[in-house]
Image: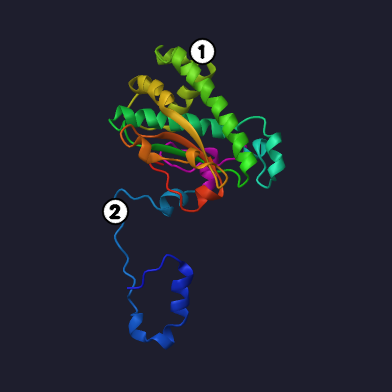
Amino acid sequence: IFISPEDDELRDIWDDKDSIGADLFPSDFIIRLFRPNNYDGQKHFYSHDIAELEHNPSPKHPTRIIKDNEKMLKMKHKMKDAVKIKRLSPSLKEAILYFLLACAIRRARGSKNVHKSMLINVSPFILVQDRINELVVEFLDEIKSSITSFYMLDTEEWSDYVIMAKLKETFETLFDVKESLEDIKAELQTVCDKLKTNISNFGNKKDSRLNYDAYEDTGLYVIAIGGYKLSRGLTLEGL
């Protein structure tokens, strides 16, 4: 058995297999394992008709087609473009609301003191990440204020308040669960109280880095914002 942390090392051995000997590489040395029932691979995410998902997103499918990002931050951008970001895109706001609702549903099902993480990775530039974090914090403050003030109302009355109406719309449009909004609304307040943001990049200080161990007993609820560091092996618990 050859075990290597780097693909390149295995490829070098494979390229030199003739000089090493045929017995090192039997024709059936790779064994395909059965897929567990609880595993969702690339077919689950990417086998659907993208055009159909674009016009008719399904609450049972995790893929969303995003087209409003260019108004917030162009795909090709520079560090100096951070000052141009004035607001979060509607799709990113919806994703944050979705995360809050998902956390509340999990709490209603008994999954309370476990880690719950969301990832926002839209730029490799630290200044851009800082600006996104500022806007996310502002939006979370709006959400917390609205939920604190109105969550105890009958959910039919939520439509009279902008944030609550958007929460209701997100739940009804994108979720297909046994719980009702009435079942989980009390948990939303707790989720808001526990939720933090964290900038995870190679420039942040040690004391600001993600530390799940410090929340082992209560669970860390976090929106992690970053770039290359989040793309290169950093594990987010409860993602």
Q: What percent of the width, then of the height, locates residue 8?
A: 49, 70
* Three-letter code, disc 1: Asp
Displayed quadrant of residue 85: top right
**Spot occupied by residue 170 in the image (x, y as percentages of width and height):** 47, 28
Q: Position of residue 165 (x, y in %)?
A: 50, 19
Label 2, residues with CA under 10 Å away: few <14, some 14-19, many ≥20: few
Q: What is the CA distance from the residue labelled 1 to the residue labelled 2?
A: 45 Å
Residue 44: x and y in percent read 41, 50
> Of the residues shown, which amino acid type is indicated by label 2?
Pro
Examine the residues drawn in magenta and state their main secondary structure.
loop
- Magenta-drawn stretch contains 74: no
Q: Could one spot residue 79 in this view of the protein?
A: yes
Residue drawn at 49 percent across, 33 percent down: 197
- Residue 226 lies left or right of residue 74; in this view the side is left
Q: Residues within 10 Å of mark 1 (few under 14, many from 20)?
A: few
Magenta-colored stretch includes residue 58: yes
Q: Would you place residue 153 above or below residue 12 in this image?
A: above
Quarter of the image with the N terminus is bottom left
Element marked by disc 1: helix
Q: Earlier in the sequence, mark 1 or mark 2?
A: 2
> Which SS class for mark 2?
loop
Extent of the magenta region:
50-68
Q: Which mark is residue 36?
A: 2
Residue at label 1?
160
